[in-house]
Image: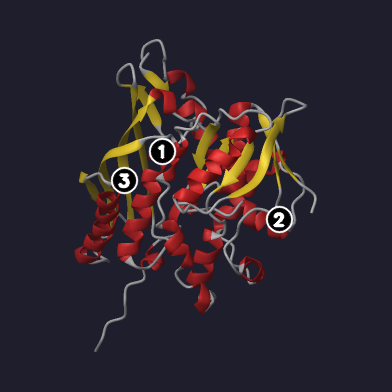
Amino acid sequence: MKSEPVRLTQYSHGAGCGCKIAPDVLSRILADTADQVDTEAFPSLLVGHQSRDDAAAVILDDERALLSTTDFFMPIVDDPYDFGRIAATNAVSDIYAMGGEPQLAIAILGWPVNQLAPEIANLVVKGGRDVCRKLGFPLAGGHSIDAPEPLFGLAVTGLVERTHLKQNGSASAEDLLILTKPLGIGIHTTAEKQGKLATAHQGLATELMCQSNKIGALLARLSGVHALTDVTGFGLAGHLLEMCRGANLSAIIDPTAVPRLPGLEDYIALGCIPGGTERNFEAVRGCLPPLSSRDKAVLCDPQTSGGLLVALAPAALDEVQALLIAHQTPHTVIGSFVSSGNGKPAIHLKPR
């Protein structure tokens, strides 16, 4: 008798970057730690956790900085090999979003050894290793524990020229905003988990999550690119608000321009909304205008291995788009940054 294939998502209470602790809760966790990073005691520290950037950075020499990041989560797809690929692609994205090139990764594996065979974990690790190899750096080791739910990710070390180091809070007023991947990964994966995903949409989210953000290292070399981040578990609204707060600016978004995976309106109507959406919305609602249920579901949808959010000078648009086109990277101008008139960063929606 043929055994049923293992469905990894049945073994986890969360999925992908939707497992992230909500931004407001995370702020409370870190509230008493801001003063623990003493820049006088550690003068080589360029970027710490206070700026909510994608990776930490320390001075390596006069020209280069060392980048360090980690990311792990529970399964967002059932296939173990794809789970490994997605987790690795997502983790290394933080290095690219800072303008760096990954040099080395080590794996983080939690596995319910009494419920799932080690051979399944082997496929997860293989998926992660294959991504690292494809992107040109080794998966050189790691650490594993017996855990109640499967989880996998990487700690990644990268290098960046200090003049090319990009942070999420360095945008300027009037900068344009480009997004490189469509939204809706959380909605699609939830629809799949609920058995509601249309046949024509099968595999679209997995394909998207496995597309690397390697273009970030090239974008960072352009002087007209002022800020970079990747859109993951906090959704577009959450990560954009981090950019706004870092630069003390507001943003205006054209909701009709925001790229989306197909079928989102139907899946929203069917209730295929991840639990992380509401947490994301509650964390940013004070900085948003009133939203329709549709806009809320899309703008606050937790993304896993989402696209890059790029802040660039208007004069650099042609150069940036030429680079993206040359590297076959889909992209959309979705809005711009503006001065925060009242001193409180916010996100505004352009009227439809």
Residue type, mark 2 in image: Thr
Q: Dot 3: few (<14), some (14–19), or many (≥20) neighbours within 10 Å?
A: many
Q: Residue at x 31, y 80 (%)?
A: 4
N-terminal of the pair, mark 2 or mark 3, is 3
Q: Dot 2: few (<14), some (14–19), or many (≥20) neighbours within 10 Å?
A: few
Q: Nearer the viewer, mark 1 or mark 2?
A: 1
Please name the residue that numbered disc 2 is placed on: 256
Q: Position of residue 17 (x, y in %)?
A: 46, 51
Q: CA distance from mark 3 to mark 1?
A: 19 Å
Q: For numbered disc 2, what is the local secondary structure?
A: loop
Residue type, mark 3 in image: Leu
Q: Nearer the viewer, mark 3 or mark 1?
A: 1
Q: What label does residue 154 carry, if any?
A: 3
- Of 15 and 81, which appears nearest the observer? 81
Callout count: 3
Q: CA distance from mark 2 to mark 3?
A: 35 Å
